[in-house]
Image: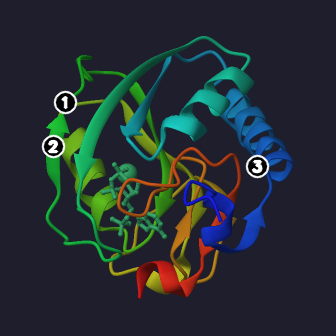
Amino acid sequence: MDSRDVEADLKHVLYTKEQIQQRVSELAAQIDADYAGRDLLIVGVLKGAVMVMADLARALHSHVTMDWMAVSSYGSGTQSSGVVRILKDLETDLMGKHVLIVEDIIDSGLTLSWLRANLISRGPASVEICTLLRKPDAAKVEIDVKYVGYEIPNEFVVGYGLDFAEKYRNLDFVGTLAPHIYE
Ligand SMILES: O=P(O)(O)OC[C@H]1O[C@H](OP(=O)(O)OP(=O)(O)O)[C@H](O)[C@@H]1O
Ligand code: HPA
Ligand SMILES: [Mg+2]
């Protein structure tokens, strides 16, 4: 078999491209309604949130501005180290702004709880979170998340921005890896 055949590494598909598009559109409609009449800055968390940020931004009908942060806590494994590092900071001054952090996944919650506190310390008018996926059973810290695409079981997932050792981000669906890949 061609070793570049990505789909051979997967166990099953959790959400198809069509399901994700539909759910992202629903979240966008909610966000449009909630922020009506207010300026909104959406902050994508690199690299995982690239796909959801691109699709969410295009599904929104209101004006938004966009910025990016790169943080990393996972390295090449499947467990969060809990130590969050800023690899690239925002270019936008957050003072007085309504900020929506856009993420691909909340797993332990360590990345987002750290990031939310970090952004709040910069004086914004508000900070909310939108994530495509959330694993409630994996939470190590409680975070208040306003927009959640799907709650999923505590299994390592890849695709649509999510990686395992930097691979699989380019899949247009979300799936679980076959155990032989990571064991
Ligand atoms: O809730 P947590 O347990 O903290 O995990 C969630 C975070 O981990 C992943 O990012 P990662 O640090 O692997 O970097 P990446 O986005 O570049 O893949 C994911 O994109 C989230 O940002
Ligand atoms: O399940 C996951 N898959 C990929 N990256 C992740 N980062 C946190 N959880 C995950
Ligand atoms: Mg990430």
Residue drawn where x is 59% and y is 40% of the image: 52
Q: Amino acid at mark 2?
A: Ile
Q: Amino acid at mark 3?
A: Ile
Query: Few, some or many C-alpha atoms within 10 Å of disc 3 (few <14, some 14-19, many ≥20)?
Result: many
Confirm or deny contact between disc 1 and disc 2 (CB under 8 A). Answer: yes
- The residue tagged 1 is 89
Of the four image quadrants, the one with ligand 2 is bottom left
Residue closest to the far top: 63
- The residue tagged 2 is 86
Q: Position of residue 103 (x, y in %)?
A: 47, 48
Residue closest to the far front: 1
Q: Position of residue 88 (x, y in %)?
A: 19, 32
From this view, report whether residue 37 is shown above or below residue 82.
above
- Looking at the image, is mark 1 or mark 3 earlier in the sequence? 3
Residue drawn where x is 42% and y is 35% of the image: 44
Mark 3 element type: helix
Mark 3: C-beta under 8 Å from nearest atom of ligand 2: no
Left or right relative to 86: residue 59: right
Mark 2 element type: strand
Confirm or deny contact between disc 2 and disc 3 (CB under 8 A). Answer: no
Q: Position of residue 127 (x, y in %)?
A: 39, 40
- The residue tagged 3 is 20
Q: Position of residue 137 (x, y in %)?
A: 51, 86
Residue drawn where x is 55% and y is 81% of the image: 155
* Cα distance in 3D space between marks 1 and 3: 28 Å
Query: Few, some or many C-alpha atoms within 10 Å of disc 2 (few <14, some 14-19, many ≥20)?
Result: few
* Cα distance in 3D space between marks 1 and 2: 6 Å
Q: Which mark is residue 47?
A: none
Q: Nearer the viewer, residue 2 or 174?
A: 2
